[in-house]
Amino acid sequence: MFNGHIANFAKRRDVEIQVIEAGEIGNEYPELWFYAADNDCEPEMMYIQNNDGTLSFKGKLNKSLEDLPAWIDSKDKLKKVICYLSDMLAAEAM
């Protein structure tokens, strides 16, 4: 589900996505960490990549993010989450 197209989609919206490989930080599965483009110190939210390619919510560090889906099973849903994060970050910057 996550590929270069999604990475570019996110980047155009000032969102960076880092792939944390399984075992890299003691994690069992790969994870996607979402950052504000101007702040790569701590992720805004994290999702676990399941064996079937879907994503499961792991956590968020940004308290203003609400109603994040527990499970993402399509590129369209992932794009909606990226747009939501981008909109929230833009609102916080004002």
Image (cartoon, grey):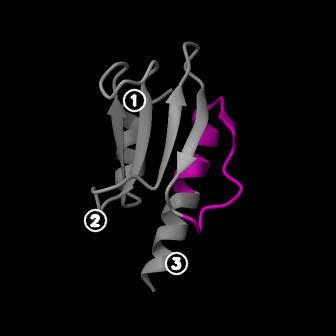
Extent of the magenta region: 63-83
Q: Residue at x 59, y 68 (%)?
A: 64
Residue 7 location in percent, x, y? 37, 41
Query: Could you tell me residue 2's position as x and y percent?
Result: 45, 30
The amino acid pointed to by label 2 is Asp
Horizontal placement of 72 versus 1: left or right? right
Disc 3 target residue: 91
Viewer-proximal residue, 88 or 58? Answer: 58
Question: Under tag 1, what secondary structure?
Answer: loop
User: Between disc 1 and disc 3, whose residue precedes?
Assistant: 1
- Residue flagged by tag 1: what amino acid is it? Asn
Residue of label 1: 3
Q: Residue at x 48, y 78 (%)?
A: 92
Whole-Å distance between the Cαs marked 2 and 1? 21 Å
Seen as rendered, the residue at the extreme top is 51
- The residue that disc 2 covers is 38
* Image quarter (top left, top right, bottom left or bottom right) of the C terminus: bottom left
Q: Label 3's element? A: helix
**Is the residue marked by circle 3 packed among few (<14), some (14-19), or many (20+) residues within 10 Å?**
few
